[in-house]
Image: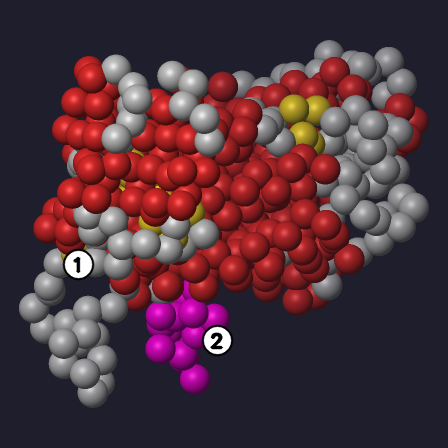
Amino acid sequence: MELSSLTAVSPIDGRYADKTAPLRSIFSEYGLIQRRVRVEIAWLLALCDEPGLPETGTLSDAQRAAIQAIADDFSLADAQRVKEIEATTRHDVKAVEYLIREKLPADCAQLSEFIHFACTSEDINNMSHALQLRDGLAVLRAAQKQLTDTLKTMANDTIALPMLAHTHGQPASPTTLGKELAVFVHRLNRQAAQIDAIVLPAKMNGAVGNYNAHTSAAPDVDWPALARRVIESFGLSQNPYTTQIESHDGMAELFDALQRWNRILFDLDRDIWMYVSMKYLKQKVVAGEVGSSTMPHKINPIDFENSEGNIGLAEAILGHLARKLPVSRMQRDLTDSTAIRNIGAGFAYSLIAVASTQRGLGRMSPNEAALAADLDHAWEVLAEPIQTVMRRYGVPNAYEKLKALTRGNAMTAETIRAFIGTLEIPQTDKDRLCAMTPADYIGLAAQMAL
């Protein structure tokens, strides 16, 4: 059966293909091969620039451009050719080397043996995987920033809109809708900064990390410095101490950071879902949509539910990779090789979740009438400011008196104000408390603009 969005095994390339399309050129087999070619070409040109390797000859500008074009002009047909070669070699990185040999300009024949010179496959792979993560992060972080910006706008628009808070699911001191959303903006931005601070490490130091082959061929070359120049040219950092593989600790740090960002998004999804359930938020009606196959009235917060589910899948993959990849038997085993091929799936499920929440937020608007009504039925929340003022003026057992008045009892404005009238506190404070309503009791929430 021909592969399409309808026949794909995974919803990443099926149902959600439109949301994950930007990741295809990065995390696909094509994307990995293309980055392997880029790394191989960068290494080859660096060898050509090394004075300690005169055997490479001196490249003309035209020759250098022709070699660089092998990477820059890499096509789907080139990737297919690599797979054809791999069918014989049964080795994916060696197949890349042979492709470059085929495409090497005729007047650069002396460089044929310098392709993949002194490298182990992991030198190429760890760099390529780091480039995939770097490029995938650019896509994911752009989506995350768009969502955070949307949330920030919503927070600013509702920063002064009073809302009854709920602790343990019970009415609590009032807040504002915007302040509660601002909390999530702050949390997401904090985790985003930690993600952005991670510079992925990479290595190009040979079969077991000691430059064994390098020094046997050219002992006078400063191989660590040469490797560092190539690694840093891609915006990565050199890991000087490795076995055959780069230890993947940087990947684990990144995946843990992405999970923390996702977990906060998960928390936001649930809170928004609750606000919809409580009618604090309204959902826009979209013509033609169906909320239930049998209940015509339904408008379900499905985008936030979709996000929750996909965050769980992202965490399952990213969490496993973060735990598994830093562990490898002695100089290396191949358990990392198969696991690491799924980094794109972790990014894809994360991107689906972000896109779903973004879509859901775009349909939300505050239900000011419902917010006001809940506040007007929660006069008991003024027990906190009243007893706090009482305590300021030394009224004994202030907390206990308000507890006896309000706990489990229905409160009204009249009940609260009658109690205030009995207090032995300054009249100005009595007047201020009597004028207070649940909607007024929001502290500095309205001033906590982003």
Q: Position of residue 310 (x, y in %)?
A: 45, 61
Instruction: Determine if residue 195 is in view.
Output: yes
- Seen as rendered, the residue at the extreme left is 287
Question: Quick one: SS at disc 2?
Answer: loop
Identify the image quadrant of residue 101.
top right
Q: Amino acid at mark 1?
A: Gln
2 and 1 marks in contact (CB < 8 Å): no
Residue 318 in magenta? Answer: no
State the residue at coordinates (34%, 47%).
Answer: 406
Tell me which residue sits at (79%, 24%) in the image.
240
Display colour scheme: secondary structure
The residue pinned by badge 1 equals 283
Secondary structure predominantly adopted by residues drawn in magenta: loop
Q: Can you see residue 132?
A: no
Name the side, left or right, on which 131 lies relative to 349.
right
Does residue 327 appear left or right of residue 258 in this picture?
Answer: right
Q: Residue at x 74, y 16 (%)?
A: 225
Residue closer to the observer: 298 or 193: 298
Mark nearest the camera among 2 and 1 is 1
Which residue lies most toward the bottom here?
Answer: 294
Q: Label 2 sits on what residue type?
A: Val
Magenta part of the chain:
1-15
14 within the magenta span: yes
Pick the quarter of the image with the C terminus. top left
Please name the residue shown 65% across and 18% down the image. 229
Residue linked to disc 2: 9
Q: Earlier in the sequence, mark 2 or mark 1?
A: 2
